Amino acid sequence: MSESDPENSLIEKAASLIREAGKATALTGAGISAESGIPTFRGKDGLWQKYDPEELATESAFRQNPERVWEWYWFRIDLVRKAKPNPGHLALAEMERLHPDFMVMTQNVDGLHFRAGSRNVLEFHGNIMRARCTSCGRKFDVDEIKREKLPRCPECGDLLRPDVVWFGESLDPDVLEKADKRARETDLLLVVGTSLLVYPAASIPLLAKEREARIIEVNLEETYISAEADISFRNKAGEVLPLIAERLRRYYENRS
Ligand code: BV8
Ligand code: ZN
């Protein structure tokens, strides 16, 4: 399907599905930050093209060549610093303000949902703006550490690493448990800008589907959930989400 303006009737339907949902949850991926200038992982200009994250975003890559890995992260940290939340992030923050029980689960490590105003956010894969000591485990905001080839822990002097979950590393058990619980109880899942290829995040829509949650997808391409979704928008997140949020706001205003 070519990208065309999202149909008004679908926007209406999406907004009413969210309004009717007791618990509404958004699962987001790199696609929601693409319009903030942060390359996705698999897109044509994606991170996967210049660097292979499967080769760099791993503990073994870091052990073998920490400078190389830090070089990649400093490059991405600069991108994130310059980036601003886009209308897609802002719309999800608006939905959280409007809806009584709205959560964002994100695979992204850029912190843009929080900067957009979302507060009920679960970060599956950590946050690139934080570093963690490989020895004492203390965490630091990257703005607090010196921009060195091999950043050292201000407390114990050992090597710092980005505070993100690499391939082959398990997610924080507490995050996993919260995500699993929410996926099994949500009435509506809004899947935005993710290719749904990275597990365990990619299994969230299946868990939601198991309990007949309604599913709305926003993605420029098909994913494994497209055919199962109640609505699958082939549009940009920054275009569709504000229209849905606007419609939702009108619902709530008319009701009060
Ligand atoms: C785990 C942080 C248990 C780092 C990330 C072998 C050994 C070990 C594990 C595995 C293995 N084989 C498979 C696995 C499991 C592995 C996995 O799933 N691999 C995949 C590649 C098959 N998972 C793991 O390792 C996870 N841990 O399983 O632990 C374990 C432990 C030991 C051994 C076995 C199991 C940890 C995974 C977390 C990895 N860390 N990020 C960093 O970022 O630096 S993942 C990283 O990639 C991102 O965070 C994100 O989650 C993912 C990219 O996915 P997307 O967000 O979906 O982005 P993508 O570019 O793919 O898609 C963008 C989409 O947006 C596209 O569909 C596009 O059409 C759309 N789009 C673009 N623009 C727009 C848009 N849509 C709307 N609007 C637009 N404007
Ligand atoms: Zn330390």
Image (tube, rainbow, N blue to C red):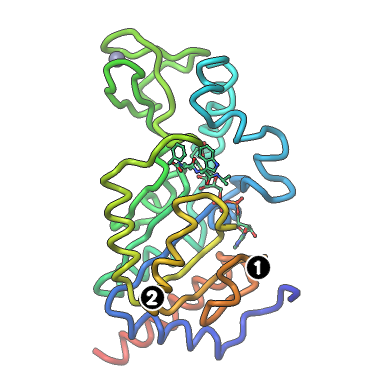
From the viewer's perspective, tell me whether residue 219 is left or right of residue 246: right
| Above or below for 239 versus 174 | below
For the C terminus, the quadrant is bottom left
Q: Residue at x 48, y 12 (%)?
A: 150
Q: Residue at x 28, y 52 (%)?
A: 177
For disc 1, the marked residue is 222
Mark yes or no: residue 128 visible: no
Q: Earlier in the sequence, mark 1 or mark 2?
A: 2
**Rendered location of residue 147, percent (x, y):** 47, 17
Q: Residue at x 59, y 28 (%)?
A: 56
From the viewer's perspective, tell me whether residue 250 is left or right of residue 56: left
Q: Residue furthest top?
A: 157
Mark yes or no: residue 100 visible: yes
**Rendered location of residue 28, percent (x, y):** 47, 58
Q: CA distance from mark 1 to mark 2?
A: 19 Å
For disc 2, the marked residue is 188
